[in-house]
C-alpha cells in the first residue's frame, strides 16, 4: 500500500469523514463475511462470527446513516449506541464494547486528530477487556491490544492519520497471523482467530477510506476442516439479551451470572441499556435474572450442543430444525394479546404471548373470539391484554365467561401492552404478574398519528376533516398536513415533559419504512440523548403508533 493518497499531514477526521470510514469498514467486513465464518472454531460454535460482526456493525451504521452533523464525537457516540443494541454473538458483543470505548475516549471532540485516534483505540481496548470475565489472548482482544499500542507509537512519531492507520493495520495483520501460537485450538484447526480477522477487516476498510484507495479484491473463502474431536460434546445454550433501563453495573451483573453457572460472559452497556451474552445449561435462569433487572429486548437463545453435533455430522432421531428461533420456542406465557396487523402480532409473539387475537381500532374482536383464545391456553390461569380502550369490556366479559382464572390487564394502547409484556416474570403466578403488568402501564407514553374523519375542536386544538392529527395518551395534541411533522411535534412535547430514554416508532399501513426511518432520524437529531427504534407494526388507519419510555 502506498501513502500517496493520504490526507494532508495533521488533518483531523470530522463527522462526515468518520461516517465514510465506518461505512467502508462495514463494506469490507461484508465482503469477507464468509471467510470469517469459515474460521469460526473458537471458543465454541455459538453462531457465525462473520455474520454476527456484520450485524453488529450494520446496527452501528444504521444509527448514523441519516445523521447530517459533522461532529465526529456525536457520530461515534451514535455508532456505539447502535452497536451495543444490535450486538450479536460473543465477537459482536466484544466489538460493540470496542466501539463504545472509542466513543468514550472521543467524547465531545468534533474532529479526531492522530492523538485522538490513539486514545480512542486504547480506550476501546480497555473497555473490551473489562467487558469479558476471563479475557483470552489469541482472540479479537489481542488484536485490539496490538492496534492500541501501534496507534500510540505512530501518534508519537507523526500527526499523519494515514500513517497511524497503516501502521496499526500492518501490526494487526502480523498479530492475527500469530494467534495460533497463542491459542492451541487455533493451531489444531490450522486457522487464525475469526473475531480477530473480522476486526482486521474493519480496520482495513477504515484505512482504505482514508488513503483513498479502492478496497482490495476478495479471494474465495478458505476451506476449513477443523479438528473437532478435542472439543467437548456438551456446550449448553448461548443466551443473549438487552436489559432496558438497567440500574445494575456491569460488574454486578457478571457476578450474578457466574453465581448462576454462566460461562463465556460478556456484559456491556450504553446509557441505561445493558447487553448480556452468557453460556449456560438452563436459559430460563439467566432470562429470569435479566428480567429482574429491567425490561428485556432482543432475546436470542441458541442450542450450541445441537450445533456442535450437527457440525460433527451426528444425526439425532426426532430432532429437526425449529420453525422459529429457539428463543421463541422456549418462551410461551399464558397471555392473550389483541393486536392489529402482523407486525404487532410478531412483536407480542416474540415477547412470549401464547395467543394473538386480531383486533384494534375499527375492528374490535368479540368476547367470543377472546374467550376462544383464553380456552386454547393449556394453563388454568391466563392474562388478557386488550391493548385498546374499546376492547376492555369485551375482554372483561370473556374473562367472566371462562372457567379459567383470568386477569384482564387494562392496557389501553399497544405500547402499554408491550410494556406489560416486559414486566412479566416467569417465576411468578398469574395474579402477581397481572399486578406487575398493571404497574408497568404507567411507565410508557403513547402517541398515535392518524387522519381525522371529521371536523372537531378538542383540547384547544382545531382540526379539519382529513387533517393529520396526533393523540398523546388519548389527548388530542396537534394537527397538520404531514404525518412526519405532526409526529415530530407530538414527540417534542412528550420528550420535553417526560425524561424519555427510548422511543419506538411502529409504522402502519398508511406509511412506508423509508418515511418511518426519516422520522427516526429527525427525532435522533433533535433529541440525541434518546434511543430510537423503528418497527413495522402493520396497523391499519394509523400512520404511527409511538411509545415513549
Image (cartoon, rainbow, N blue to C red):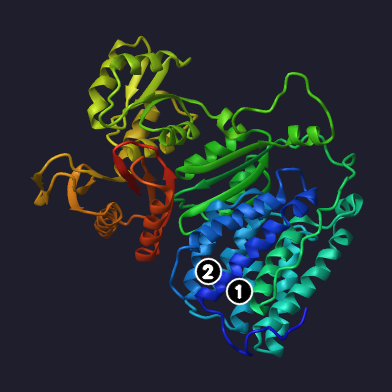
Q: Residue at x 40, y 47 (%)?
A: 512
* Location of residue 167 with respect to 96 vertically, above or below: below
Residue wearing tag 1: 120
- Would residue 236 be found to the left or right of residue 246 on screen? right
The vertical placement of 271 against 279, above or below, is below
Measuring from the top left, give residue 464's x and y in whole percent.
12, 48
Distance CA(mark 1)–CA(mark 2): 10 Å
Tag in front: 1 or 2: 2
Q: Position of residue 449 (x, y in %)?
A: 27, 46
Along the polypeptide, which appears first: circle 1 or circle 2?
Answer: 2
Asked if residue 493 shows in the view, the reply is yes
Badge 1 density bin: few <14, some 14–19, many ≥20, Cα 10 Å: many
| SS for dot 1 | helix
Q: Position of residue 529 (x, y in %)?
A: 40, 63
Side (left or right) of 122 relative to 407:
right
- Circle 1/circle 2 CB separation < 8 Å: yes
**Which quarter of the figure has residue 91?**
bottom right
Is 169 drawn above or below residue 246 in the view shown?
A: below
Residue 268 placement: quadrant? bottom right
**122 relative position to 454: left or right:** right
Q: In which quadrant is the N terminus drawn?
A: bottom right
Report the residue at 57% width, 70% height from top. 20
Q: Which residue is mark 2?
A: 76
Q: Identify which residue, 241 or 220, lies in the foreground.
A: 220
Amino acid at each position: 500500500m502506498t501513502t500517496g493518497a493520504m490526507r494532508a499531514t495533521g488533518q483531523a477526521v470530522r463527522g462526515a469523514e468518520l461516517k465514510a470510514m465506518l461505512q467502508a469498514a462495514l463494506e469490507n467486513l461484508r465482503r469477507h463475511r464468509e471467510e470469517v465464518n469459515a474460521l469460526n472454531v473458537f471458543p465454541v460454535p455459538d453462531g457465525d462470527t462473520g455474520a454476527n460482526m456484520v450485524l453488529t456493525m450494520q446496527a452501528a451504521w444504521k444509527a448514523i446513516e441519516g445523521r447530517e452533523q459533522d461532529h465526529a464525537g456525536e457520530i461515534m457516540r451514535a455508532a456505539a449506541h447502535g452497536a451495543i443494541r444490535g450486538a450479536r454473538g460473543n465477537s459482536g458483543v466484544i466489538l460493540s464494547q470496542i466501539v463504545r470505548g472509542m466513543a468514550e475516549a472521543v467524547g465531545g471532540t468534533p474532529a479526531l486528530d492522530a492523538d485522538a485516534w490513539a486514545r480512542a483505540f486504547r480506550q476501546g481496548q480497555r473497555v473490551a477487556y473489562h467487558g469479558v470475565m476471563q479475557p483470552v489472548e489469541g482472540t479479537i482482544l489481542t488484536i485490539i491490544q496490538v492496534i492500541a499500542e501501534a496507534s500510540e507509537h505512530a501518534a508519537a512519531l507523526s500527526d499523519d492519520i494515514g500513517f497511524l492507520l497503516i501502521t496499526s493495520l500492518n501490526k494487526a495483520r502480523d498479530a492475527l497471523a500469530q494467534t495460533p501460537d497463542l491459542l492451541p485450538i487455533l493451531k489444531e484447526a490450522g486457522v487464525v482467530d475469526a473475531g480477530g480477522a473480522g476486526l482486521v477487516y474493519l480496520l482495513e476498510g477504515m484505512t482504505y477510506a482514508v488513503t483513498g484507495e479502492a478496497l482490495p479484491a476478495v479471494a474465495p473463502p478458505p476451506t476449513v476442516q477443523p479438528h473437532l474431536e478435542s472439543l467437548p460434546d456438551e456446550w449448553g445454550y448461548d443466551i443473549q439479551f438487552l436489559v432496558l433501563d438497567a440500574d445494575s453495573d456491569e460488574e454486578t451483573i457478571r457476578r450474578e451470572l457466574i453465581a448462576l453457572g454462566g460461562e463465556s460472559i460478556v456484559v456491556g452497556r450504553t446509557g441505561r441499556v445493558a447487553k448480556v451474552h452468557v453460556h449456560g445449561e438452563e436459559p430460563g435462569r439467566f432470562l429470569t435474572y435479566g428480567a429482574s433487572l429491567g425490561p428485556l429486548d432482543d432475546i436470542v437463545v441458541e442450542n450450541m450442543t445441537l450445533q456442535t453435533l450437527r457440525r460433527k455430522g451426528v444425526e439425532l432421531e426426532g430432532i429437526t430444525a425449529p420453525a422459529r428461533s429457539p428463543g421463541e420456542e422456549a418462551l410461551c406465557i399464558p397471555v392473550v394479546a389483541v393486536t392489529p396487523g402482523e407486525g404487532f402480532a410478531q412483536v407480542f409473539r416474540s415477547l412470549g404471548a401464547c395467543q394473538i387475537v386480531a383486533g384494534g381500532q375499527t375492528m374490535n374482536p368479540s368476547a367470543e373470539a377472546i374467550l376462544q383464545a383464553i380456552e386454547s391456553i393449556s394453563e388454568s390461569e391466563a392474562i388478557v391484554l386488550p391493548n385498546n380502550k374499546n376492547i376492555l369490556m369485551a375482554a372483561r366479559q370473556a374473562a367472566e365467561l371462562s372457567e379459567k382464572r383470568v386477569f384482564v390487564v387494562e392496557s389501553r394502547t399497544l405500547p402499554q401492552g408491550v410494556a406489560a409484556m416486559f414486566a412479566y416474570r416467569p417465576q411468578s403466578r398469574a395474579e402477581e404478574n397481572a399486578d406487575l403488568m398493571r404497574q408497568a402501564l404507567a411507565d410508557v407514553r403513547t402517541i398515535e398519528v392518524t387522519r381525522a374523519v371529521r371536523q372537531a375542536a378538542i383540547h384547544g386544538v382545531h382540526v379539519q376533516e382529513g387533517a393529520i392529527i396526533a393523540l398523546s395518551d388519548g389527548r388530542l395534541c396537534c394537527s397538520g398536513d404531514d404525518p412526519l411533522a405532526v409526529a415530530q411535534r407530538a414527540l417534542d412535547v412528550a420528550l420535553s415533559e417526560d425524561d424519555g430514554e427510548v422511543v419506538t416508532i411502529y409504522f402502519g399501513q398508511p406509511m412506508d419504512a423509508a418515511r418511518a426511518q426519516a422520522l427516526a432520524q429527525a427525532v435522533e437529531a433533535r433529541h440525541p440523548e434518546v434511543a430510537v427504534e423503528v418497527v413495522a407494526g402493520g396497523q391499519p388507519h394509523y400512520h404511527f403508533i409511538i411509545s415513549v419510555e
